[in-house]
Each structure stands twice: as structure tokens, then as C-alpha cells.
Image (tube, grey):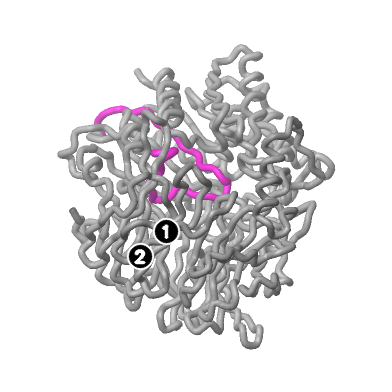
Amino acid sequence: MKLLVVLFAGLLMGIPNVPSYAQELLTAEHLWKMDRISGLSVSPNGSESLYQVTRYDIDENRPSTYIFLLDNESGESTQLTFNGLESSPFWCPKGERIGFVSRRDGKPGQVYILNEGWGEARQLTDLPVGVFSPRWSPDGSYIAFGANIHPGYEGCWDQLKEIMEEQRNSKVTAKVTENVMYRFWDRWLTNGFFPRLFKVELQSEEVTDLMPNTANYFNMMGGVSYDISPDGRTIAVSMNSTPEPFQKLNHAIFLLKTDGSGEMTNITPNNEAPDLNPVFSPDGNYIAYGRQNLYHFYADNVQIVIHNLRDGSQKNLTADIDLSCSGWKWSSDQSQLFFHAQHNARTALWTIPTEGGEARKLFPGGSSSSVSVSGDRLFFANHTFSDPTDIYRMNTDGSNLFQLTNANESIMLDLSLGKVEDVTYKGANGVDVQMFVVYPPDFDPGEKYPLLMLIHGGPHGIFGDSWHYRWNAKVFAAQGYVVALPNFHGSTSFGQEFAQSIHGSHADLPFRDIMKATDFMEEKDYIDPERTAAAGGSYGGYMVSWIAGHSDRYKALINHAGVYNIHMQFSADYTANRKYQYNGSPWENFDNLMASNPAMFAHNFSSPMLVIHGELDYRVPVGHGLLVYGIYKEMGLDARLVYFPDENHWILSPQNSIFWYREFLDWLDRYLKE
């Protein structure tokens, strides 16, 4: 069941060919049949772990999520829940009980607990709203959790039910606001609900609102980042500190009393950029949290700061290290912090002394996340171009790597996956640019292949060494395409300066990088330069429209959820800071804004374009896709529109995703296949 450690380490470091005995080609259907691991939670003594597995029923077009118990020595897993409605598993302090969130009996998610022996679960909360992000107090007396409530409920759950019922039954469908931020991603924020933290006592089952009179936001993508002090009396939570109308968001670290008084103290009031992910030290005297310094640059490096709770002093551990950190955890003796950070198109696992010093890379390969510390061992999740997510164990010094799960072994062994190559070429201004190249299975360098140039979103993101379900390059390569994935100027993991280099001009340097990447690939004997295409989503879609107005070299273009008219991005879900990103706005430096606007260059359009967009996409409103498609058709050019009325910025349902892959590949085949 387990891969050899040496083999796995080689896969992550060198990314060689996958063994050639497999028969099937990877398809979108394979992706939706895979077990998707998340929610790793290690027991207090480190002997076991909980994790959740999400499985999709393609015919029913829906997911089910189950909780598993993992033996951290043998790697054997035991399924604990079976109805597909459980998630967010977590341990009690002594490890004899576990908790989770369940949506049983048609109710919104509630907290349940299981005693050792894993018999019948006990429902602990029974609220009219769902709960999220549960965590046991260190003394085991209560469980904290988040929930969205209407402040008008005034602590009375029956009153909240009445408010919810009134909203459901109202015949008025208007949404009214005076806020700057009034919708986010795929939901409107005008119903008056805000998240708060609560606690429920294990014995009495009494629920206490820990944040009375608070109406603000935690993580806008869901959940909440918080930690409970070792004595259980204080919660450190990351919460937006700006009031309505939310002209901009500024997450700060608040200390919150757990006695229900609502007493809160902002310990980062002087930083106008986000402060994130507070984690108490084992002795409770310190908090490690993440600080950004540029409020108008969302990809600004996240630095790890240690806040001394005794005297209020702070120490920035990574101020002089060009990394953006995430997911930090204290070592058992408080001498080190373990964390994740992108580096050269990978998300590595690192350590740094808490007294300060050099950051050391412990595990460099693939994309790692969810590190947990137990004594002298680390547990974390990892995935690569060639392997979906699994759970791994190793010593805190980086030795003795061991793969604990192999969730998709039965599927992966039957697949033929092409090799992945990590290359560097000269991009704009002669700067080295990193790029992955994914080859078809059974690639023959003596043959000629069509080229697919992929353009990532963000723009401050990466094409990493990672297993991607929505844009899986190996699915494209399996259909006979050589796939190039350049990490152009603006990409993260190559240092702050490289990421920030396109601030104020999103088009110029990335466009030149992509053209030079295409030149680099077309010089290969195995690439047919007459059969090339470019595709991208979000910012990648923006760049596809920019390419359409500035080059006719590609035989086909695919634009998924792409920005077409920058003007319209001031109708997006979050408009703060856009004038800094674009170095212009409709009311100031307008010429700068228009200089990088793809809509200004429609007169040059000629390359066939597939346009894909979702109605519920509030990050890049659907009007972008409809506008560029309408212009294409009015110009008499080849174009095809794929519109999803029930999808957001991403295509998330199995059947829609399979259809998306089919449309994507059919469009390429129409123009690139001989």
C-alpha cells in the first residue's frame, strides 16, 4: 500500500516519468472518482490522526464527506462515519473523544462528539444556523465554534429563528446596501448576518455568545482563524477591524475573553495591512501570527511575528527572509516554528528558531499543507503534479519521511501519466522565468505535437508542483498536447520583488514572458508551431483577451472567467485597492487604466476564442464574458460561449466540470488536431 520513501522523495525532487505499465489515459471522470483528503487533525499523543475524505457521485452530481481514523505508525485507516454528512474532525485534549460537524436529519451543521470506542455520536448543539471551525478547549470543558447570526437576535435563538423565517417568507427580493463591499465570491452580504465565535459547555450544553454586539467579518472565503490559550480563558482571533461601509478590509489580531463578557483587545492596531492566523505558544506567554505590511498588495509577503503577551513586545522572525509564510505551528519545546512557504513553484515545509535566525527547508517538494507537530514528529499533507493529496510523517529534523496514506492507489496504478519537466528560460528584460512542461504519455521526441500554453490566475499566484482538479494539465496532456505552464512576472514563490513587479501594469511583463515562453517551446523539434493555443482563467482569461488584441500567433484561445473590460472590475465583489493594482481608475489616471485594458484592442481580434463564464461569479462578473463574446460574434469571428447559470468563479459540480473539460478539449481539437 505504501510507496517507498526514496521513490517518493525522488518523485517530488526530480519529477521523472511515471512507470509505463499503466494503460488508461487520465480523464476528467477519473478526477471526480478520486478520494479528496483534507482536515488533518493529529491526536494529542501523536499516535492517531483524524482526516476527512470527500467523494463525489457523478450520477447524483453531489459530494459526500466521511471521517477516517489513521494509525500514525502503520498507516492503516478506519472509516468512522458513513452517511456522508460529517466534516471538520477534531480531538479533545486527552484524546479519548473526538468531535465533528454533521448535517444529519436535514439540519444545518451541528457539533457532535464521539467517545472512545467510537459508538453512537452525541449531538451537542441544536441551533437554527450551521456551525463551523470547532475547537476543544484545553481543559476539555467547552467547545468553541463559529456561526453566522443576525445581530438583531440579541442572544435569543428563538428570535433568530423568527428573523430567518421572516427573510425566507418575504415577497420582496430587492437587495439594498450602502456598503462598499456588499457581495463576495458567490454570495450577497445584504441579509444582515455576520459571523461570531461561540462556546458550548460539555456538561450543560449551554451555548454562550462570546462576541455580543460584534458585527464584522472573519475569513471572507469561510471559516475563522483562531486559537484558544492553554488556560482556556482567552481566544486569539483574526477579524476585520474596519466598520461599515467596509471601504477596505484590515484584519487584526484580537484577544477575546471566553467568559461571555465580549471583552476584546486589538493587539495589532497600528498595522493597516492584514494580521493573520494567531497561534498560542505551549506555555501561553506568546502568540505567533502573520503580518503583511502593504495593505494595497494582496500578495505581500506574510511575515511571522511573535507577540509577547506579558509585556506587549513583538519580534518579527522573517522580516529579512524573502518568503510568504503560512500554517505555522510551535514545536513542543517552543524552540522552533514549523511553517509552509512557497519557493520556486513548490510549497515547502520549513522551520525557523523562535529566537531568530535562518529558515531551513525541511521538505522541499510538491505542495505541502496542514503541518501538525507531535513531539519530535511532523504530520502534513502533500500533493504533486503526479500524485493527489496524501498524508505524510517525518521527524522534526526532516529525516525518516513516511507516506501514511495512499488514498487513490487503485486509480493511479491504472493510469498512464506523462513526465513533467522543470525548465528556465529568458523572459522579459532577460530575467530568468521558471516553467513546467507536461508531456503526453508515451511522448516521442521524434514526433510533432501541438502546444497548449496555460496562463495562471491571480495574477499573483503560481503554477506549482501540485495536483489540480479544476485545471489538471495532465488531463490536457493525455489528449496529445504538450502543455507549458510559465510562472511569469507577478507570480509568487520567486520573491517579493518578482511578484510586485507588475503592480500598476498587469499586461506588459507577463505578456512578454508568455510570448518568450512560446518562442522557447516552438524552437523544440517536437513542437509544431502551426498548432499552438493559449488558455487561462481569471487573470489568465484577462491575458487571453490581451493576447487576442496583440498577437495572432495562436490558432485557438480559451478564456475562462476572464477580465475583459477593466472598467467593469469596479463592479466586482471587492473593489478596494484596485486603483493601486491598475495605477489608475475611472476617476483618476484614467489613461493608465485604459492602457492595460483588453477592451481597448478589440479591433485587432482574429484568433478563435472559447469563452466560459459562471453567473454566480462576483469576483469577475459575468458581464466580462458576455461582452467579449458579443463583440467577437458581431465582428464575425469564430467564438463559442459556455455559460453556467449555477457556477461561480470556479466550476465545482462533477457533471459541469466534466462538461467543461469536454468543451475545453473539443475547442482545442477543432483548431489544433491534424
Name the outermost residue toward the top. 636
Identify the magenta region. 445-472
- Residue plotted at (18% across, 38% down): 22
> Few, some or many C-alpha atoms within 10 Å of disc 1 (few <14, some 14-19, many ≥20)?
few
Q: What's the distance in space between the residues labelled 1 and 2, CA to CA?
A: 9 Å
Q: Amino acid at mark 2?
A: Asn
Report the amino acid beneath label 1.
Arg
**What residue does disc 1 label?**
122
Confirm whether the magenta stretch covers residue 290.
no
Q: Is residue 503 above or below residue 317?
A: above
Residue 136: percent from left, percent from top:
48, 68
Say which mark, if any, is on residue 634: none
Q: Is residue 38 left or right of residue 646?
A: left
Along the polypeptide, which appears first: circle 1 or circle 2? 2
For image coordinates 57% across by 27% down, the residue present is: 645
Element class at badge 1: strand
**What secondary structure prevails in the magenta region?**
loop
Please determine whether, in this image, residue 266 is positioned above or below residue 282.
above
Report the quarter where the C terminus lies. Answer: top left
